[in-house]
Amino acid sequence: MNPLLFTDPVFLFLFLPMVLAGYYLIPRPARNPFLLGASLLLYTWGEEIFSLVLLSSIAINYGGGVAMKRSRASARKTLLVIGIVLNLLLLGTFKYTGFVVQNYNTLATHLGVRTATVSLIHLPIGVSFYTFMGISYLVDAYRDASETEPRPARFALYLSLFPHLIAGPIVRYSDIAAQLGDRPANLHNLAVGMRRFIVGLGKKVLISNTVAVPSDAIMKLPQAALTTPLAWFGIACYTLQIYYDFSGYSDMAIGLAKMFGFKFPENFNYPYVSRSITEFWKRWHMTLSSWLRDYLFFPLGVRGPRFRLYINIMIVFALCGLWHGARWHFVAWGLFQGLLLMTERAALLKLLDRLPRFASHAYAVFAILTGWVFFRAEDVPTALGYLRAMFRFPSAPALSGLTPYFTPRLVLVVFAGVLGCMPFAPALNRWLADLLERVHAGAAAIVQTFATTVRIAFYSATLSGSLIMIAAGTYSAFIYFRF
C-alpha cells in the first residue's frame, strides 16, 4: 500500500489539477460532495480496505454527536464516555496492540508464563490525527462549545478533508464549521494557497530531504564509530530535518485548504527561536499542544497541590510521546519534555527571564537537540548510546569524520535552513509595509514592483527546484506519516 503523498508526481500533476478544475467548474452546491469524494478516493488509494477505519471513525463520531444532541442532559455524559472509548479502541487496536503484546511477552518471559502471539497489524495512515479530531468534536458537543453537525456528508467532509487527513493540522470542528457551509473559493484564495503550498513543498524537498541524508547516515552508524562532533552534527541535521519536514507538510496542508476556500489553524510559529521548552511547546505543533491542553491537561485538573500539577504534566507528555509512536523511546522523549516543563515551572523560568536572550536561547536549543535524540533513535538503548557519544568530550575532537558530509550543497542548505528558522520573512514584510506608507506614491509603486518581482522569482525558483529534485528521485516520506 502506497499512499499518494503531496510530493508525489501523480498528486501534483494529475490528482490536484483535476480536483481543482472540477471544484471550480461545478456548481457551488455540488462542491462539498465532490470534495468529499476526492478526499475518500485519495485515502482509499493508499489504504484500500483500511479506509473502513476512517469510515468507522466518521460513523462513531457523527452518531455520537447526533445522540448527544437528542438525549437528556443526564445521558449525555454516558454517551460522551462511550464515544471516547470507541475512538480510543479504534486507535488502540491498530496502533498499540503490537506494542502491548510485545511488552506482555517480555514480562511473561521473565515470569516463565506463556507468551502471546499476534499478527502484524497495519497502521492506517492518519488514524492518530482523525481520532483526536473526533474526540474533540464529541467533547465540544458535550460542553456546548460548538454545535453538532446534523448533515452526515458535511461531517464526513470535516473529518476526511484530504489536506489535513494524513498528518494534520488537528482541525477542530469549531474552526471550520461555518466554512463547511459557505467559503470564499475564488482566484485570490487560490493564488494565496498556491504560494503557501510552494513554500511547504520547498521546505520538504529542498531542505528537509537534503539534511536527511547526513542525518540518516550518522544515526545508523555503530556507536563505536560515533565521534562527539559527528554525533552533534547528526542531531543538528535531524533538528532541521524534522522541522522542515513537518512544517513543510503543514504549509502544504494549509495552502491546499486555502485553494478550496478553507482557513486552517497555523501549526508552527518559529519554534527554534524559543527561550524555554515552555515557549517551544507554544510554537511547535500548536494544534497538538493546544489539544493536549484543552482535552487532557485541564480535565486532569490544574488546582490543588503543586505536586499534583507536576504529575499531570508528566502524564500529559508521557501520553504525548506515546501518541507519536508505540515505542518506549517515544515515551522517553515525552517524559523528557515533561521533566523540562516541570523544572521550568518550578523555578527555572524565572531564571531564564533574567538571563540575556542568547543564554536562554542557547539553553532551549540545547534541550531541544537533546530531546530529539530520543525521538529519532530506534530504541532507548540506542538513544542513550548516542547521548554518550554527544557528551564524550574528548580532549582532541576528531573533526575529520565530518568531511564527507560537508558538500557545497549541504552547506548552502544548512545555512538557508538556519535562516529560515528565524522570523526574518515576517519582519521583512512589516518593514516593507512601513516603507510603502512613508514614501510618496511614485516611489511606492517602484518599491512594490520590485518586491513583487522578487516574490515571483522566489516562488518560481522554489517550485522549479522542488520539481527538479522530485523528478531526480530525491524523495522520502514525511516523518509524521507514521504517527
Image (tube, rainbow, N blue to C red):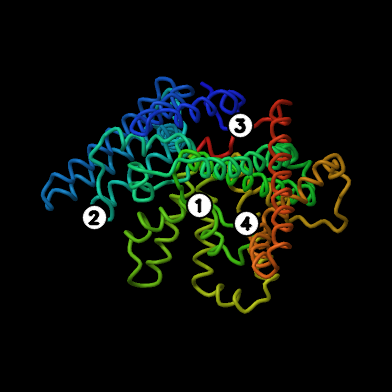
The structure residue drawn at horizontal position 53% and vertical position 36%, both measured from the top left corner, is 481
Q: Earlier in the sequence, mark 2 or mark 1?
A: 2
Viewer-proximal residue among 103 and 91: 91
Residue 457 location, quadrant: top right
Q: Residue furthest front?
A: 442
Determine the secondary structure under disc 1.
loop
Determine the secondary structure under disc 2.
loop
Q: Which residue is mark 3?
A: 7
Viewer-nearest of discs 1 and 4: 1
Compared to 103, does 300 lie above or below?
A: below
* Left or right relative to 354: residue 62: left
Q: Earlier in the sequence, mark 1 or mark 3?
A: 3
Classed neighbour count for the residue bearing mark 1: other residues with Cα under 10 Å, few (<14), some (14–19), many (≥20):
some
Viewer-nearest of discs 3 and 4: 3
Classed neighbour count for the residue bearing mark 3: other residues with Cα under 10 Å, few (<14), some (14–19), many (≥20):
many
Q: Earlier in the sequence, mark 2 or mark 4?
A: 2
| Marks 2 and 3 in Cβ contact (< 8 Å) | no
Determine the secondary structure under disc 3.
loop
Q: Which residue is mark 1?
A: 266
Q: Position of residue 110 (x, y in %)?
A: 46, 37
Viewer-nearest of discs 2 and 4: 2
Q: Which residue is mark 2?
A: 144
Q: Earlier in the sequence, mark 1 or mark 4?
A: 1
The span from disc 1 to disc 4 (Cα, nearest Å) is 21 Å
Classed neighbour count for the residue bearing mark 4: other residues with Cα under 10 Å, few (<14), some (14–19), many (≥20):
many
